[in-house]
Amino acid sequence: MPQARKTGFENSLGEYIQFVDSDDWIEPEMLEKVYSKAIAENLDIVIYDCFYERDDGRDIIQQDFSSSNKIDAIRSVIKGTMKAYTCNKFVKKELLAMVKFPQYSRSEDYFITIQNLHNSNKIGYISKPFYHYRFNAQSLSNDIKRKIIGCIEEKNNWCKIVNFLKGQYPDLKIFEPELSKRINKLKIRYFQDKDTRKIKELFSIYLESRFYQYLFCHYFRKSVKMIIPYGFFILYKKFKSGGNASK
């Protein structure tokens, strides 16, 4: 998929680029609306909401665009409150010319979008869903075998993302705590699988993420979620038995 995007970009002639995946679709007026905003406000990127289409219905995915500052935008993408999708971003072609397209598909949107946001001068937002992102349970991204491969791809792409950020920003604390949480979620996956080799590889991505502190909190939260319902169940049983005894 990353190479398909790269090939499409290299053969494009327009001033702006809009990616549309093969099983998705767009609203008829989308290009007119986003292009008009881009030109009127001299924007490098126009971000907009999208529909999440499922067989049993649809949701609207709104973007966290509380700030047009690119540092804040990158933080929102890392956190996940602004989706990393390349498909809901109308991007100036000259930005994509600076992008190093990743080799792997998993988390490719993060790598491409973070580079675009960093290279941009002005970002705009339209609070309206234009893009229809279709969820396909049979797609490669939802296939079990593909997910196993995807974990490795994700780790490799996040190595590239962190290295890119390190090369552009002398102090990555400006992306905290979002960056640590994102990396630790990857680490904990391999920790649960007891894959020590991959755990060591992931530690090399971002040593500053305080993984063991995150791990303790993770298992503490899981324990609380298990204990509280069990505690209520015991209290309920005692209450019920006490009530029966009093009759």
Image: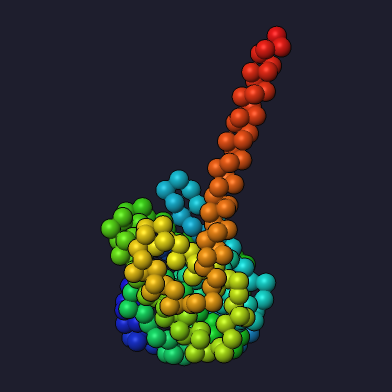
Residue 173, x across and y down, in percent: 61, 80
Residue 85, placed above or below residue 12: above
Q: Quadrant of residue 47?
A: bottom right
Q: Quadrant of residue 1?
A: bottom left
Could you tell me which residue is drawn at 44 percent across and 90 percent down? Answer: 98
Residue 20, x across and y down, in percent: 41, 70
Residue 218, placed above or below residue 228: below
Question: Between 114 and 10, which is closer to the camera in this rendering?
Answer: 114
Residue 17 seen in render: no
Q: Quadrant of the C terminus?
A: top right
Could you tell me which residue is drawn at 55 percent across and 63 percent down? Answer: 214
* Residue at the farthest left position: 145
Could you tell me which residue is drawn at 39 percent across and 86 percent down? Answer: 100
Residue 135, placed above or below residue 113: above
* Residue at the farthest right position: 246
Could you tell me which residue is drawn at 49 percent across and 57 percent down? Answer: 52
Q: Quadrant of residue 65?
A: bottom right
Residue 179, x across and y down, in percent: 55, 73
Question: Between 20 and 80, which is closer to the camera in this rendering?
Answer: 80
